[in-house]
Amino acid sequence: MAEILRRGAASAVDENTCPQVQSVLAKLSLCRTHVMGGRKFQCRDCDEITSRYNSCGDRHCPQCSGGKRTDFHDKASKLILPGVTYYQVVFTLPSELSELALANRHEMADLLVGSAWKSLSARIKSEQDYDPAAISVLHTWNQKLDSHWHVHLLVPGEGPSLSGTSWKRAQSPVDSANSDGYHLVRVDPLRRAYRRRAIAKLQQLRRSGKLSFGGKFESLRNDEDWDAFIDRLESKKWVAYIQPPPRESSSANQVVRYLTRYLTGGPISDRRISAADSKEVTFMAREGARTGGERNQVPVTLSTTEFIQKWCLHIQPNQLTKTRYFGGWCNQRQAEYRSRCEELLRGEGRSCNSVDPRETVAGLVEDRPDVLCSDCGSDRMELIEQTPKPTWTELLDRESEACPAWYGTLQQKGFVRMLWEEYGIGREDWDMRNAVESAEAPEPKRSRCDQLALPGFLPPDPLGVLDLIDSR
């Protein structure tokens, strides 16, 4: 996957591509290459030199962020108590909102996750009368890499009673046809509550002017079209899927492993890619629309450019949090909630030791074997040189030799566009002023605004550019 992105990034982006997408692809292109710095080892047996280069550390990188996955897995595993039944609950946005979310990522993430948790926690409290908790992880893709926003929640099916001092386990209602013994809440009322809360939040966002409308959603600025849009959403059956443990012997850590695997690194892993070259990428994807997913997989072939562009749909803003903790597992209540759970479980004669995360972390992070000689395979390696990782400012400067050529070109185009939009001059005028300043007055160094204000070299100013510069 990393090689596909490195090889095809230049053809998949242009000057209109989101700057963050450009930056992420540039960082991924440099990951674990010599420009990142690193360490050199010499084999004590054959004198061969082996290099290990630094990684980029970006959360979208297919090669990196193993440490972040480990941290999440360790934290989540410490919340899991043995013998307690855990459920995975998945809430999905309708396709219309998944598309709208591409231009409103923060707002739609809060809408989705907040509506899902509030609906679920309210149903658990009213139907089962215990204090709920949850971990949520946001996903924005389906198997074919389309925009498909949904959230996975790991939820205990037991907890401290809200109306007493006992430990309560979720029970099936008397009229339930459930035969496997697993029940969290009634799913139809949950779906309706989720839809009601989400639409109310959507209405609030529009009233406060926090939604961006463009492209196919431009008409939603009109009140009549907006009302028709809301009517369509209200007529839909929204997806809320409750998955019990697949087997009686299954543990919550299996769900934790699943959530951890897709926490970082992007929406698709190497094992699903069956073929790739400079023109096309073929990968396996589940086919069908059955709730909970289909097992049958079919090959999907896309041009390399289209594949990368779809992959880039799932690059999220740095400030968008994919993982959240709610109820008894939120940071403010976590210690008190766990203490209360342990006390009640001990009162029932049950164990309350956390699952050791080391037992289940294998395979979730990049392999980190000891450095071995690339020639003879010996592990008798001696560190002989270490180069620090340069800053991203240094690496991605458009004049830097390390900067990917396509990224430098886009930065140059963006710089020229900024000159015209902000100051009404072109690159040649900018270079001339810098040259004149350097020749006439090398000291003190001037700011960019001062450079633009050099006497004798200003163009006509019918639009008031000089006033703008002075005010800055």
Image (cartoon, rainbow, N blue to C red):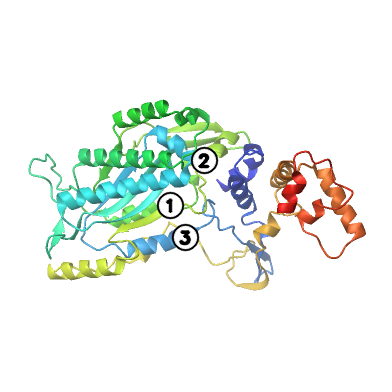
Q: Which residue is mark 3?
A: 68
**Amino acid type, residue under disc 2 in the picture:** Leu
Q: Which residue is mark 2?
A: 313
Q: How many numbered marks are there?
A: 3
At horizontal 52% and vertical 37% (from top left) the residue drawn is 310
At horizontal 68% and vertical 66% (from top left) the residue drawn is 48
**Amino acid type, residue under disc 3 in the picture:** Lys
Helix, strand or loop status at disc 3: helix
Q: Earlier in the sequence, mark 2 or mark 3?
A: 3
Instruction: Verify CB contact (< 8 Å) between mark 2 and mark 3.
Output: no
With 211 as the anchor, is 279 left or right in this view?
right
Q: Label 3 crowding class (10 Å Cα cut-off): few <14, some 14-19, many 20+?
A: some
Q: Nearer the viewer, residue 112 or 313?
A: 112
Q: Earlier in the sequence, mark 2 or mark 1?
A: 2
* In this view, 34 is above or below 354: above
Quarter of the picture containing the N terminus is top right
Q: Nearer the viewer, residue 420 or 84?
A: 420
The reply to whether residue 367 is visible in this rendering is yes
Rendered image quadrant of residue 303: top right
Percent coordinates x, y for residue 263 in the rendering: 44, 52
The reply to whether residue 144 is visible in this rendering is no
